[in-house]
């Protein structure tokens, strides 16, 4: 199976490498073309524009940094739209909002192409290990034909229906994550200010029904006020905001997420936006006594 | 090692049975004495009053239903206080507030006895399986002497310092639990109202960094609006209230826990107090459209 | 002074009538032209399109129902843009978002015209009585030249600086209003459920430092569960959302407004969106016991 | 009419002075007896203990600093209880919780005496001007007999039913006040951070339906970060907490008050507890950017 791959950032590089390792023929493109070299050493072909990748491959996956990059690769000169046509499939795994996905979908299908939106859950390590979770939506046949590739990239792929649902589902997952992080932060600070050990609290949580990889992974560094950015706080807050907006559209009142969002905003106002989202604990800790 | 055991409710019965099975000599007492019969069949002795248990045993564990029962067993006629004295240890594993623990501690130590407060995390199943978590505080020597028994009852015992700290730690754990349950509920409802499958959301969460036994255990029944009471909502709300009061004492602002507490109160006002605390999702779901 | 007036809804009709009564020469236009008749009886002239009004008058005020009407009157065929030019001033008093104002401003000034954004605070009665409050922003000279007209329409005009500031100030005022309404609602319900009279609470509030026309005006009907729509709840909630978005832009954490917004959303989900915003008390009242 | 008066702090002194000025015969007592001198100059008699005041007067009013002082004056040696008896009335205007009122009520009526709980709304200035608001509850006949005195002390007296209702009503009024203060603070900060003038916002609010003496009185100094303590923030926060507890008892969910309470707690943690409660705006303002 031949696959085009657009975008070789941290995620895209790991993902295209996995495809190569599992015997897929991969043709790559990246805005800075030199980033393709390492992939070529492992057997990848290169094209000089997104349009040429599309022309060459029946299936193309994109993994771009943000909505504007995702739009640019499709709509700009030498972009996807110039070559997309009946029979070809385009799978965008970038994390974008539902609106961006819908726009790309409309353009692709308007040219007869097929489109799947497929944001992933998981960052660098799961990408390298082929342990991502794919939240796919859009053209069902394309989704099914792509499963061999998806199975290499992730441990599980979900088909969620119409385009936009992938983005929405990801927001909801991240909203739960943001509220949980606040619940956790409040507990750690309360333990500490009540004269208990917040490290012992971690041990106790770890043995009970709430034990989860996030608490285990981030708790010890939070107790040391250390927040190396795996998922920047400002992005977490943006996702909370968008999830609340989704709730607004559908008249779902979510007071806990709203309170968590305001805590992330306070953390942003304290200059913590570029740190890991676990730095929200600093907004809880803050006092002058 | 001979152990007295006061209180043979669901928890106390399972716990004393475990002690018997592991070769401890156990002397039991229960307000309704007939409940002792099953234990006697397995080798337990019986005393007719708490005082007689204390008189007979160097170490006595109590597992009572609430603060008033815990106080009554100590202070009433034929109670613990009548026989407690130097050399004897009393370990109260009932879930009570810090104030109740402190009162019992003062009385016991006033008579020369030793006291450990030891609320447990875990309900019926972990009690039967000897998989409880013990949050102990108070007399350190008594704690250490009791470890052989604690090791039979639970998978881990924590020594948390002065009396009151066990109760406080348990409140903090339960506060995190209550906020997490609200985060989870809001996410499930948002998925549903946004046209996504809340069952799929469970599957996605289960594969990611937030996966935890509570979401896995309660999610499927929450999606079916089914809330068999493992931990009643009114007790969860009471613990949220007490944890917020602890935050008040120590000037810790906890807006997410406060929002979660108000959601539990709304659920109580909807008549859901006796259902499982996961029924708080009904307060999120409620709408008339 | 000759003034053009676009839009003769409840507000626009009252306002243009006031201008006539105070000796201004007024030329009106309304999408449904027959609505101009009453004004003509009082001495107004009529034009058949917004463009013709602009052509005729040096100063034109618009009072339209919403952003899309405000945009349409400017950009559509026979619209304001066709005749606006150097020397002419356009004052839009419609309640629109900052983005809409900025778009109109850019178009008007691009043609050499001058623009003032001037949303008003106050509804039908103050409009009739010339007691509105004008939150103006944009071209300062135009603002100053317009003061004779503003003094007829309102009791006070504020000049707030650059275009967009009028819309922002109005959102902030409405945000405070929405949070106050929730504070009031919670108090009324708490009184009632605590066995106190919520009517007596109104009397007590009325005598103290918090007495204000909104509590006095809406309290009695709220206690009778009566919510005739002066300002629809769904519009209040939209303004809360936009004010929170403004806070998001500027990293201002506003937990009380966020909680109030979620209460309005709950009220919307209960089908109360078209009632007065004071109907948010129904979300507080709701219980099943 | 002869009135006993216990407690000559800022409030009590102003109130007893008013009674003297209006022709009442007043017998005073204060813990520090020298504080009685000024009253004596204006015609008051003095007794050396609360018991002696009760013995001498048919009606006695108390105005003490807090619940413990209120209890001590009744229950300690030479206290009210020693002389209270059938035919005598005791009116406690101290601000205490419902529990304290109920305890005093039980003791007084147990001796055959009559009791009215009468916390007041208003501070030094209204006390001096006889413009307090009395929230009275308890013995109805005593309330009615006391109206001549109440009319001198305040502009309005409310009879609220059973003992405890006065304290509850006051908490509710203060809860609304605390939430309003947060709504106001968030608006002022949002204006400022959005590039608008928070002084202009005050002017706009002052002209609209939300205008109230509290905003007018405190707004200008809040904009100057000046918080001279009229009502200390820590007391406001305590009243929020107690009002939320009242909501808890009655299953009233109050998310806005809960969010406001957490903001006051954050302000306390910033060391602002002894400043005026309007200093909560500092918790909203706080940022590091």
Image (tube, coloured by chain):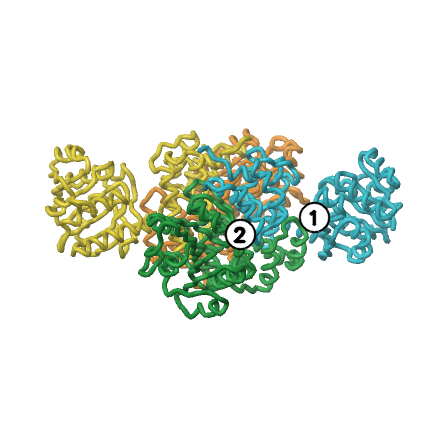
Chain colours: A yellow, B orange, C green, D cyan
D285 and C55: which one is in front?
Answer: C55
Q: Residue C53, position in %: x, y?
A: 39, 60
Q: Is residue B8 left or right of residue D130?
A: left
Vertical placement of residue B146 versus D58, above or below: above
Q: Is residue A139 left or right of residue C194?
A: left
For the image, the number of numbered tags is 2
C122 and B5: which one is in front?
Answer: C122
**Residue C143 appears in view:** yes
Q: CA distance from mark 2 to mark 1?
A: 24 Å
Asked if badge 2 and badge 1 are on a common chain, one would say no
Q: Chain of mark 1?
A: D
Labelled disc at residue C177 = 2
Could you say whether the residue bearing mark 1 is in a helix, strand or loop? strand
**Which quadrant is home to the C terminus of chain B?**
bottom left
Task: Determine the residue positioned at 69% across, 53% down.
Answer: D165
Task: Determine the residue positioned at 30% across, 51% down.
Answer: A98
CB within 8 Å, label 2 to label 1: no
Would you name the residue on which mark 1 appears?
A: D121
**Residue B170 appears in view:** no
Q: Residue A124, position in %: x, y?
A: 27, 37
Vertical placement of residue D43 versus C50, above or below: above
B199 and D272: which one is in front?
Answer: D272
Q: Residue C144, position in %: x, y?
A: 48, 47
Q: Residue B215, position in %: x, y?
A: 39, 48
Q: Is residue D150 left or right of residue B164?
A: right
């Amino acid at each position: 199976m031949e696959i085009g791959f657009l975008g070789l950032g941290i995620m895209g590089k790991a993902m295209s490498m996995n495809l190569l390792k599992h015997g897929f023929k991969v043709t790559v493109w990246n805005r800075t073309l030199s980033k393709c070299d390492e992939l070529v050493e492992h057997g990848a072909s290169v094209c000089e524009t997104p349009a040429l990748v599309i022309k060459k491959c029946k299936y193309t996956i994109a993994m771009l940094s943000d909505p504007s990059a995702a739009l640019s690769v499709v709509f700009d000169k030498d972009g996807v739209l110039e070559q997309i046509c009946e029979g070809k499939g385009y799978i965008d795994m970038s994390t974008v909002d539902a609106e961006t996905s819908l726009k790309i979908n409309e353009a692709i299908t308007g040219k007869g192409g097929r489109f799947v939106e497929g944001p992933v859950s998981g960052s660098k390590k799961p990408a390298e290990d082929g342990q991502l979770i794919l939240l796919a939506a859009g053209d069902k046949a394309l989704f099914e034909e792509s499963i061999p590739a998806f199975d290499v990239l992730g441990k599980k792929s979900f088909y969620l229906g119409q385009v936009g649902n992938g983005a929405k589902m990801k927001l909801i997952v991240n909203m739960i994550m943001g509220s949980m992080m606040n619940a956790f932060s409040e507990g750690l600070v309360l333990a500490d200010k009540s004269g208990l050990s917040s490290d012992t609290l971690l041990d106790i949580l770890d043995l009970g029904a709430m034990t989860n990889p996030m608490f285990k992974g981030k708790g010890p560094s939070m107790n040391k006020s250390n927040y190396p950015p795996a998922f920047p706080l400002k992005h977490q807050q943006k996702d909370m905001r968008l999830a609340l907006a989704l709730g607004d559209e559908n008249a779902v009142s979510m007071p806990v997420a709203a309170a968590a969002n305001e805590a992330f905003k306070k953390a942003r106002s304290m200059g913590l936006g570029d740190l890991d989202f676990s730095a929200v604990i600093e907004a809880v800790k803050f006092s002058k006594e």
